[in-house]
Image (cartoon, grey):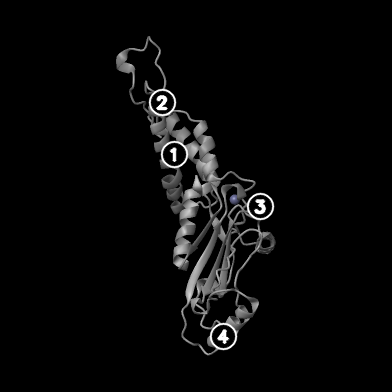
Amino acid sequence: MSEYEPKYVVVNMVEEAEKLVTKFEIDTVTKFTIFSRNKGFSHDLDCLQGHRVLWEDKGQEEGVKVPCNGTPFIILGFDVRECHFGPDRNTMKKKKYQMEKTIEADQDHSYTQKSRTLVQNTKKLDCPARIYMKKICKFPDYKILGHDSIWKRKKQVQKLKKALSTNEDMLREEEIHIFFPGIESHKNHLTGQRWVWLFRKNLFNIRVSTTNGLERQHLKLKQDYLSQTSDKSLSSLVNVLFSQVFPDSYNRYIDYNARSLESIKAYASIVPRFLKNRPRLRCW
Ligand SMILES: [Zn+2]
């Protein structure tokens, strides 16, 4: 499936890029948070003077690489997101906050105000998976025509820089280059997709018509689905239900009923005709 492989996508608007990131998170059942982003990525820059003019961007080992096609460009901004199971970057801050709270609680002898420690054990697992984005501005008016040479490039850069400094009218094409990591980039934790797959192998049929059945559904929801997310809000619960629990449940229902068909598996000869090829009862 394509969402398991690393992907490279180019779009023209930051909004489009954001939509793709959200879709990617839903499709791969992952969550990414902003690790580093500069102003040029989210805002339009008034002045493009002083930026380095490039012909290609080889980037780092992983991430965005802009190939050379003879058109000069500048990098306006970048945005790097890391998996929410990534490195814990706030340990010092959290420790400091916890110490301050403890000191405060020690000094405060009033019993009317209860101090609560809000610091929770971190769920960070050092996962290295990252989404890399770069926003670039291309200048097609300064494209090198014909044979490419260092001399031609230098000349075009000079012309372009002069035009930029005098705010001359010119064609500008913005592009957002996005690198999406493959599922293999996630380390030290199960990804939603992998987890769902594992879970599907361990199916069992429960009817929610008994209290015991209902309790077991509740437990499964908490242990298998909600334990994968640190966000305890209602919207997160609804998201998990609609993006994971219900689709899984539906697929299992189909799976299970298909498996009780005569064409998939032969019935024992003693099974009477009226019991064959009947849908099985299950709730999710
Ligand atoms: Zn991860």
Q: Viewer-nearest of labels 4 and 1?
A: 4
Residue 248 — which label? 1
Amino acid beneath label 4 = Lys
| Residue hosting label 4 | 159
Q: Label 4 CB, ligand 1: below 8 Å?
A: no
Q: Is residue 145 above or below residue 196?
A: below
**Tag 4 secondary structure:** helix
| Residue hosting label 2 | 259
**Tag 3 secondary structure:** loop
**First-in-chain label (4 vs 1):** 4
Amino acid beneath label 3 = Asp
Q: CA distance from mark 1 to mark 3?
A: 28 Å
Q: Is residue 98 above or below residue 44?
A: above
Q: CA distance from mark 3 to mark 2?
A: 41 Å
Left or right side of 105 for 171: left
Residue 73 — which label? none
**First-in-chain label (3 vs 2):** 3
**First-in-chain label (4 vs 2):** 4
